[in-house]
Image (spheres, rainbow, N blue to C red):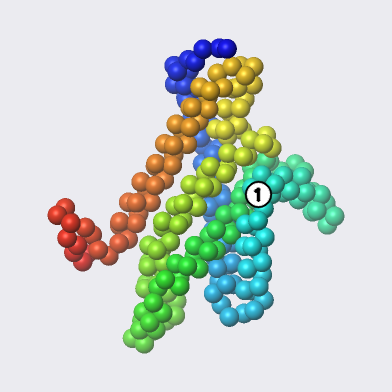
Amino acid sequence: MRPFHPQYIFEALPQLILYLPVTAAIVIGTVFFGSLLGIFLAAGRIRRGRVGRVFANLYIYVIRCVPSIVLLFLIYYGLPEFLNVFGININDAGKGFFVITTFSLLFAASMAEVFRSAYEAVDRGQREAAVSIGLTEFQAFYRIVLPQCVRVAIPNFTNALVNLMKEGSLAYTIGLIDIMGKGQLMIGQNHGSYSLEIYLALFLLYWGLTILVEKGAGIWERRLSPVKQEKGGAGKCS
């Protein structure tokens, strides 16, 4: 059995970090499109329209029951065939397109619940009070409701983002070369050698990314908080 070489972990890290922009692009694209779809799904669940509510509930239920890797393969192999029926050819689309499409659909289901629960956590009386003093519905939502929704949503949004970042590592299964894909390539180039060292390097990299996301979300949440904690533990209105 080949001996363990811990120094190779630090040799592998720079090579993996070169592909960090690919992972970041997938996450950013997924968050953007997934959040947009999540807003529409949340609106469908909040509003009284029966059709929108049924569609949103059905969508969330179905998507949550499908494993990420199964949906990724369905989109990668099935979407081109489905669209080809209508004369649309996407066979030349990059693998990133299929990855972002897949994880946007998954992320939207989580975001719909995050946005809905955040909206319902804000007392409706605040919006009504804002409208009663002359603000329009849009102004009341933008100035009063939305900041509170964002603050409530941040913890759950952060959890969903971290899960997305980890689930996104499955993109290598269709040939996308991100940090996980590069790690698999390195293992293959070494004929299976240094597998443990490379996986430990990936572990450290994903761990570091998770810490950065959580720290950033914590700073964002504290900035939006109306009450800031003093050093001695007492709170004071900002």
The relative height of residue 122 versus residue 219 in the rendered view (above or below) is below
SS at circle 1: loop
Residue corresponding to mark 1: 67
Q: Residue at x 67, y 36 (%)?
A: 173
- Looking at the rendered image, the quarter that the N terminus falls into is top right
Identity of the residue furthest to the left in this view: 232
**Residue 131 lies in quadrant:** bottom left
Q: Give the percent coordinates (x, y) of residue 31.
A: 53, 52
Q: Residue at x 56, y 77 (%)?
A: 47
Identity of the residue furthest to the top in this view: 2
Circle 1 packing at 10 Å, graded few (<14), some (14-19), many (20+), is few
Q: Is residue 62 visible?
A: yes
Instruction: Judge from the rendering whether residue 70 lies leftward or rightward of residue 177; answer left or right.
Output: right
Could you say which is closer to the camera, residue 113 or residue 140?
A: 113
Q: Amino acid at mark 1?
A: Pro
Q: Residue at x 64, y 47 (%)?
A: 68
Q: Give the percent coordinates (x, y) of residue 182.
A: 58, 28
